Amino acid sequence: MGRHRKASNSSIRRTSVIALTGLVPAGLITAATNADATEYIPFMVADSTTQSASTIETPEPIAEKTDSQSVAEAEAPVPQAAPVPAAAPEAPPTPELPTSAVASPLGVPTVNVSAYKNAANILATTTPGCGIEWTLIAGIGRVESTHANDGKADQLGQLLEPILGPRLDGTLAGNNVIADTDGGALDGDANFDRAVGPMQFLPETWNRYKADGNGDGVSDPQNLYDAALATGQYLCDGDLNLRDLAQSTKAILRYNNSMAYVANVLAWSTGYATGIVPSSDQLPRIH
């Protein structure tokens, strides 16, 4: 962001239907066709002359239902089975990416992936409405510093060498003049600001969105975990829903007010999510 322009002030997934096939009996039991066969009659024996009438049991009469009972039964609600809620669709897993941007265009060092995913997981709890994916944060990291110069950081995310953008004094075409806002505390320049860290925050912006992503009690723009979380907070600010393309575009424009910049970030983000390297026409030159 700070390497190109000052941030703009714009406020800018089954159900499977299972067919239950009825099983039709293979055949029916046929009746006896023997002409001498005697029909069986309940409560009777073959030689009825020797059967005492007193031994024949008479079934108890069945009480008839009253009209009110019949009506009540007819009107009684039929129990309904409780609906089974459909399972939420799972997000497709991202492909396994190479671990070096030098070896492959889609390479992302392991420590960077850890920092980006850590930030997205934290924001899924603190700002669930934002819906930010780690791949979008990675897109910013790719454009701003090629993932901290291809992962030049220790396992805690601390950069081996600080990353500083150009001095914003007006001598570099395409950059605004931005006078010092932090007394040189973050960028070492007491006269003009410089973007700092792997995600290239201007000091003023960092001081507003700074974060402690690795939980060490320090918010450092030169730490991958801290910078990645601050980036997510910056993009999510203003209750934006980054599942929506228009709103994610608005958020990215905060970093650099350039649609070419937005196209680059989204192309890399999509590449990390699909494993497909962006084509050259998807990566317009950022002026």
Image (spheres, grey):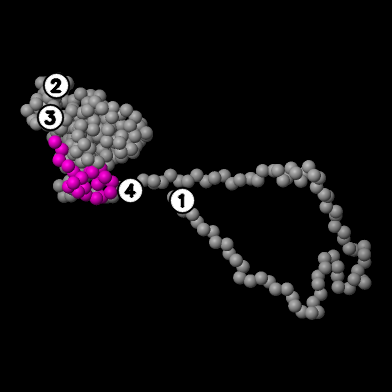
**Residue 164 location, x and y as percent?**
13, 31
Q: Nearer the viewer, mark 1 or mark 3?
A: 3
Mark 3 vs 2: CB contact within 8 A: no
**Residue 221 location, x and y as percent?**
20, 30
Q: Nearer the viewer, mark 4 or mark 3?
A: 3
Q: Nearer the viewer, mark 3 or mark 2?
A: 3
Residue type, numbered disc 1:
Thr
Distance between mark 1 and mark 2 Cα atoms: 58 Å
Q: Which residue is mark 2?
A: 180
Residue type, numbered disc 2:
Asp
Residue found 23% across the figure and 30% down from its top: 254
Q: Which residue is mark 1?
A: 15
Residue found 16% across the figure and 25% down from its top: 186
Residue type, numbered disc 3:
Asn
Dot 3, how many residues are within 10 Å of its Cα: few (below 14), some (14-19), or many (20+)? some
Extreme residue in the left direction? 171
- Is 286 a magenta residue? yes
| Dot 1 or dot 2, earlier in sequence | 1
| Dot 4 or dot 3, earlier in sequence | 4
Residue found 85% across the figure and 57% down from its top: 59
* Secondary structure state at the residue bearing disc 2: loop
* Secondary structure state at the residue bearing disc 3: loop
Q: Nearer the viewer, residue 185 or 260?
A: 260
| Dot 4 or dot 1, earlier in sequence | 1
Quadrant location, the C terminus? top left
**Residue 236 location, x and y as percent?**
30, 32
